[in-house]
Image (cartoon, rainbow, N blue to C red):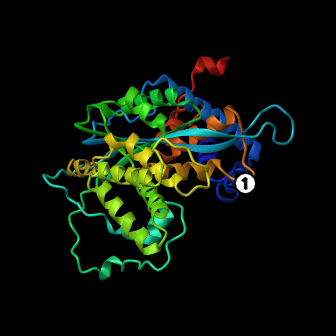
Amino acid sequence: MVVQSTVRAAAETHSYDRASIVLKEVGGINLSAKTVERVAIEVGGELKVLRDEGNGALVRASESPPVLAVAQCDGGRIRTREPGQGPGVHDAAWRETKNACLVRMTCQTSDVDPQPELPRAFCNPEKVAELAEKEPLSGIPVPLPREHDAEPDGPDWRPKRLLRTCLSSMAPSHTFGAQMESEARQRRFFEAPVRAFLGDGLPWNWSIHREHFSEFVPILDFIHVLSYVYRAALAVQHESAQAWSLYLALARACWQGRVSEVIDGLVDWLKKHGLDPTAELKADDPRQAVLDAVRYLTNNRSRMDYPAYRRAGLPITTALMESMVKEVNYRVKGTEMFWNDPEGAEAILQIRAAALSEDDRLARYLARRPGSPYVRRNSSAVAA
């Protein structure tokens, strides 16, 4: 049980030092942070091998094909150092992590768009500014809480999460795409009658879709769309009320599948101001936000048929993915947190992803791992 407790503490607490304290104070297990780290790296390496073998050892054998299979991926950031260089941090660098969640979900279809109007949350100036990482516009009233809204709520068409498994790795995108496909096939996602793949505008997300998930409906995360059109509205209109009114019009058009109208309108504005959509401006030029929005929407236009996705009962945001990235970052990012590249970084990502998976794969693996009290030792190995 010591190994199981040690790995679980290493996966769930913010550092190996904290894991050592928790083990001692809660479990009465007296291990140094270095020992916790050694065990975590060892088990993380074993999980990596099982992942790369792709033989289904980590997946529940009894899992049936889902009604709706959803794959999502996104990048993260982790700080690394060069190992074996003595005390201190050497060759520190920021590295991109690849993250994915594969989710079984409910699916409720409709003959008509179940929510043709922009949701209240996306009409809240404070919420939208937060999503776009901007300061809220002044003088724009915030909608009343829902309990004071006289308008009745419509049916909730949004698919519900049933079971999530997680992947995280330092691997390049072409390798990570193969890891995602392997996990999805082991979980019988390609047998699902309805399949969706969600991502933001990162090119490698869609290269993974093209190479490994082309049978899945591609959907651009709507939250990122909101951020781009909000910033564009601020650049086009300088008065708060006019900027907010323009944002609502642009966001509503995208929500209703009229993205071509949005692109055409922004392109017309650029031309009136003597700019071509292919122009390059200085980073601090506010008009750059309009150029960015035009390019983003144009590049992703084929993945923005949101009314059709809602009728099919598909998710249209990567909220589940964003949440998972935050959960991974809780363990791997910190002010003074650097990981040996690549062994230490890959190991912590493996045990964290396994701990976040909702199929108990970490507990199941530790229970049957050689040396576990629940696994009978090989007599020849003991004799040796």
Mark 1: which amino acid?
Answer: Thr
179 vs 103, left or right, is right
Q: Count residues near mark 1 (Cα–Cα under 10 Å), then give few for <14, some for 14-19, many for 20+.
A: few
Residue 203, x across and y down, in percent: 47, 36
**In the foreground, 149 or 368:** 149
Q: Quadrant of residue 121?
A: bottom left
Pointer 1: what residue? 335
Q: Please state the horizontal and vertical placement of residue 232, each as a whole percent of the image.
A: 46, 58
Image height of 313 relative to 239, above or below: above
Q: Residue at x 57, y 22 (%)?
A: 378
Toward the bottom, the furthest residue is: 148
Residue 291 x, y percent position in the rendering: 48, 49
Depth check, front residue: 59 or 204: 204
- Residue drawn where x is 59% and y is 34% of the image: 170
Left or right position of 92 against 288: right
Q: Is residue 170 above or below residue 124?
A: above
Would you say residue 45 is visible in this rendering?
A: yes
Q: Quick one: 328 or 256, which is closer to the camera?
A: 256
What count of labels does the image hold?
1
Identify which residue is drawn at 43% across, 77% down. Answer: 140
Q: Is residue 84 above or below residue 53?
A: below
Badge 1 marks a residue whose secondary structure is: loop
Q: Quadrant of the N terminus?
A: top right
In the image, residue 167 lies at what x, y percent?
49, 38
